[in-house]
Image (cartoon, rainbow, N blue to C red):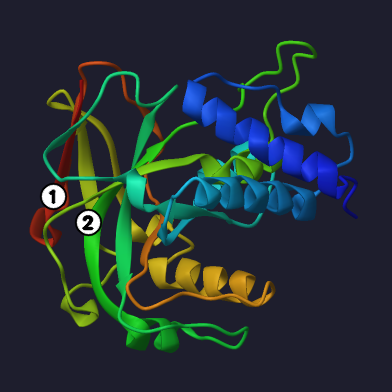
Amino acid sequence: MPVMNAEQVAAAGDALYQAEQERKQIRLISAAHDGMDMDDAYAVQDAFVARKQREGAVIKGWKIGLTSKAMQYALNIDIPDSGILFDDMFFDHGGVVPKGRFIQPRIEAEIAFIMASDLSGDKVTGADVIAATESVAPALEILDTRIFRADPQTGAQRSVLDTISDNAANAGIVLGPERHSFDAFDLRWAGCICFRNDEVEETGLGAGVLNDPVESMVWLVHRLASYGSGLRAGDVVLSGSFIRPVEARNGDSFFADYGAFGSVKIDFE
């Protein structure tokens, strides 16, 4: 049952926005609001998103997180989470992330869905997702956190409630240039070798995402339906990472080799 009132939710959303602008982390929201639940967390995320929209940000899609068993076990949960992609989060393949743009960036490898048509409803199936998808593409997600990993006052560790509040730690996206029709690949076997500075850091397969990235898309559409929302034509959706997050330091170069599926590259200044 939610414990945060409207004023507390709005204040938390504003604090996250200021943290993003100033590149300074804030205290754990879960530590400041004992007993908060996922409804509270998504309410804070909505407030954060609304503040960004008031400042001119435009929604361009969604990200799905916590889709792998390893990440779910780490946070003691059994469901994914989701966040919003904004227009200012998109970086060019082969581009450079300016120094100081993020606080503690990390990289994940994912498969992106580009939607051909609107999709909504709590009865949506995997076949519906496939029919509504224009193309799929290799992608990297840039994670960042506007919230301390450990609360400086209590020592409490950041929880999934803090991550959800913080727009699911969403910060950036890099799309590879390749676009594929859905039937060109079995996404369960589409995967990548992720290099940092020419050294292999992680490998993984699409099956690590709820057994099939399509299933994470179904989960997202069902969750959005519970709020009277859905996906829109043109939306880009990050379906979930199949590698652990890799720290992105100043001067690091990342290259995700998806084989025949394509590749994605991004450098950090």
As drawn, 219 above or below 67: below
The amino acid type, in three-letter code, at marker 1 is: Ser
**Camera-side residue: 35 or 22?**
22
Q: Is residue 203 left or right of residue 61?
A: left
Name the residue that disc number 2 marks: 138
- Residue 267 can be seen in this image: yes
The amino acid type, in three-letter code, at marker 2 is: Pro
**Camera-side residue: 269 or 180?**
269
In the rendered view of the protein, which quadrant contains the N terminus?
A: bottom right
Residue occupying image coordinates x 74% and y 43%: 10
Horizontal and vertical percent position of residue 94: 11, 39
Residue occupying image coordinates x 90% and y 46%: 3
SS state under label 2: strand
Q: Residues within 10 Å of mark 1 (few under 14, many from 20)?
A: many
**Camera-side residue: 88 or 215?**
88
Residue occupying image coordinates x 50% and y 21%: 22
The image's mark for residue 263 is 1
Cβ atoms under marks 1 and 2 closer than 8 Å: yes
As drawn, 98 above or below 114: above
SS state under label 1: strand
